[in-house]
Amino acid sequence: MKKIGILGGTFDPPHIGHLIIANEVREQLDLDEVRFMPNNVPPHKTKTSTSNQERLDMLTLAIGSNPCFTIDTIEWERNGPSYTIDTIKLLKERDTNSEIYFIIGADMIEYLPKWKQIDELSELVRFTGVKRPGYSTETSYPVTLVDIPEIAVSSSWIREKISNGKTIKYLVPDAVKIYIEENQLYGSTKSIGNR
């Protein structure tokens, strides 16, 4: 049976924290692959700053050097909010001989009781939790914790830095940084390209 990790998110933009989480979880749980799954309309967030195509382009650049990383745009194939239970049911239909490890940060562990059909969902996936600074990992749901370095980097923080004209060097892969600058995303200008 194939072991597939799923890492969802807006990836607006993808950053080193996403890559470290995916790599550490894959290695420690001996997963065959980790699929990055960009959200369409996250139920708990507002619309993204960039288009789906721009997020896909950045994600493609971010994971390009790792053959164990792939992208699954399954959530873009339907309208409305992206509830995880609906996505997982579709994945189970596509990948009938697979075991799904759904990777979540500690902020989402706290939020689990509010997820749509959480009891059914917890029977379909193996929740895999990673720590985040400032969040508890205590929960009554079955979550396998994976010990990884706690990286206090977020996409919102990176967007804020860009809009303030600050460098994002080392926070995102170089190819993503160049893409952001060339396309002047998040209020960036080409003039910060050498930082």
Image: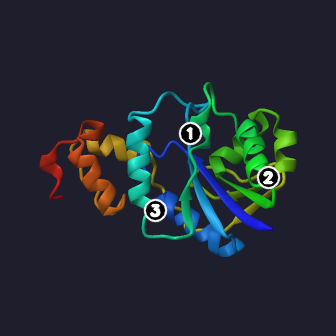
Numbered mark located on residue 63 in the image:
3
Which is more N-terminal, label 3 or label 1? 1
Local secondary structure at mark 1: loop
Question: Label 2 sits on what residue type?
Answer: Val
Residue indicated by mark 2: 125
Image-quadrant location for residue 98: bottom right
Which is more N-terminal, label 2 or label 1? 1
Q: In which quadrant will I find the C terminus?
A: bottom left
Alpha-carbon distance for marks 1 and 3?
17 Å
- Please indicate, yes or no, whether residue 140 appears anywhere in the rendered image: no
Alpha-carbon distance for marks 1 and 2?
18 Å
Contact check, label 1 and label 2, Cβ < 8 Å: no
- Please indicate, yes or no, whether residue 92 appears anywhere in the rendered image: yes
Mark 1 is surrounded, within 10 Å at the Cα level, by few (under 14), some (14 to 19) or many (20 or more) other residues, namely many
- Percent from the top left, x then y, of residue 178? 25, 55
Q: Between residues 45 and 57, which one lies in front from this camera angle?
A: 57
Residue at 43% from the left image edge and 55% from the top image edge: 60
Q: In this view, does 165 lie to the left or right of 170?
A: left
Numbered mark located on residue 92 in the image:
none
Q: In which quadrant will I find the N terminus?
A: bottom right
